[in-house]
Amino acid sequence: MANLNQDQNRDQWSSKVGFVLAAAGSAVGLGNLWRFPYTAGQNGGGAFVLVYFAILVLVGFTLMLAELIIGRHTQLNAVGAYRKIRENWGWVGGIGVLASFLILSFYSVIGGWVLNYIVKSLTGAFTVPNVDMADMFVGFITNPTEPILYHAIFAFLTLGIVMGGISGGIEKYSKILMPSLFVMMFLIMIRSVTLPGASEGIKFFLAPDFSKINGQVMLAALGQVFFSLSLGMGVIITYGSYLSKDENIPQNSLIIPLVDTGVALLAGLAILPAVFALGFSPDQGPSLLFITLPAVFAEMPLGSFFALLFFILVLFAALTSSISLLEASVSYVVDEYHWNRKKTSLTLGLIAFTLGIPSSLAQGVWSHIRPFRDLDILDSIDFVASNVMLPLSGLLLCLFIGWVWGIDNALKEATNNGKISFKLAPFWAFLIKWVAPIAILVVFIQGLRS
Ligand code: PHE
């Protein structure tokens, strides 16, 4: 049951571990299991992983703490949080909330694909002899109705959980889903690295080839850190707003990126060695999860079982991310317009579902519609949300904390008014004022130019 904060009638996490699981659940998602392995595969494997680590330390940790500070300080949603500190900055939170909503619309479509792949593994679709995995995938996503049905199921699962409220809904589910995710991922990883011929893949993924590090690899890694940690969306601000005043937030902002990276590494070790062992190409891009992996499973002993296990795991991870995406806009409407949570979740969930329909149709009957830079509808929404709104919101967050609200105020909140020690404070101050904004600016400009 929720602990209600009497002053504001606002939910709080009922336990420390509940918050960590939920925040890590938001971070760990399709970004780790699907995007990280294929991006690493396209960007030189170990070289990418190394740069990813460097950027994680410089930008990921910095912004994670910044968002938790603002959320916990104001105990409000992203828009309300900025506005409470500086009246005319609310729109910055608005960019994040809007971006999270746009991302939710197509995230749910991909979540639907995952659901379909669970059904496919249950019905033995991957074990049919000589089945062409690419044909199977394309045949499904171009169908005008079936993917929308799965998209609807995923959207309803998401809004159903968010309707339950913070500790009653998200926290309860995260407690079950997150640890299962770790265990399942670990099992698949063991299976993968023990396949004959896997060692080449392990080397590819873990031994950095320094000559492969270039601007493009660094940019790819920076973008991945942003997406994977759920930053710039108002999501972490919102989750931080449910944290109690005596929680150690610098510590939390270390734990969450570490958990997120741990899962990404497990996913890389589960996917890339198997790809090598079975003679696939590591740089085949976004289809790696949906086309290569089923083929990998089909050639593995106990393949159907592992396929089922894996896609259930991907579904868990995608759901804990999508509920955080919905929560960002739900908490905004609940705080600012005083709607009740159930009505808000239902309404916004249905709007996000409707918004996602064109993204689903864009894979087939509407694939000729190119609203932006010759990208289909899904990719256009992704581009505007992830490559424009997200870096902009992250950059403004750095400027807001470093130069407008001020480091001293931020550190007061981070240390619970000096009650806990935060030894890295001067380092963090330098990162948020200089290093992180400059790094983000580079991604933003490159993102618009590429
Ligand atoms: N971080 C999530 C993932 O890796 C996606 C996400 C982005 C969730 C932004 C919430 C906010 O899949």
Image: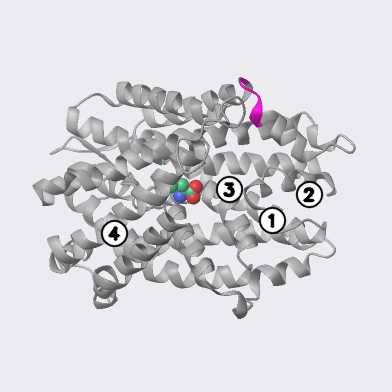
Determine whether label 3 and label 1 are within 8 Å by CB. Answer: no
Residue 181 got which mark? Answer: 3
Q: Which secondary structure, mark 3? A: helix
Q: Dot 2 corresponds to which residue?
A: 296
Question: Are the residues at dot 2 and dot 1 in contact (C-beta closer than 8 Å)?
Answer: yes
Residue 129 in the figure: left or right of residue 214: right
Q: Specify which label sits upstream in the sequence, 4 or 1.
A: 1
| Residue hosting label 4 | 395
Three-letter amino acid code of the residue under disc 4 = Leu
Q: What span is in magenta?
A: 141-145
Residue 15 in sight: no
Query: Residue, x 54% and y 61% (percent of image)?
Result: 262
**Farthest residue, direction bottom:** 210
Tell me the SS state at disc 2. helix
What residue is pinned by disc 1? 271
- What is the quadrant of the N terminus in the image? top left
Q: Looking at the image, is mark 4 or mark 3 nearer the viewer?
A: 4
Q: CA distance from mark 4 to mark 2?
A: 40 Å
| Residue type, label 3 | Leu
Q: CA distance from mark 2 to mark 1?
A: 9 Å
Please check the rendered image and state whether residue 445 is part of the magenta-colored stretch, yes or no: no
Viewer-side label of 4, 1: 4
Residue 276 position within the rendered picture, expressed as x and y whole percent measured from the top left: 77, 61
Question: Which percent across, then down, holds residue 326?
Answer: 38, 35
Disc nearer the start of the sequence (3/1): 3
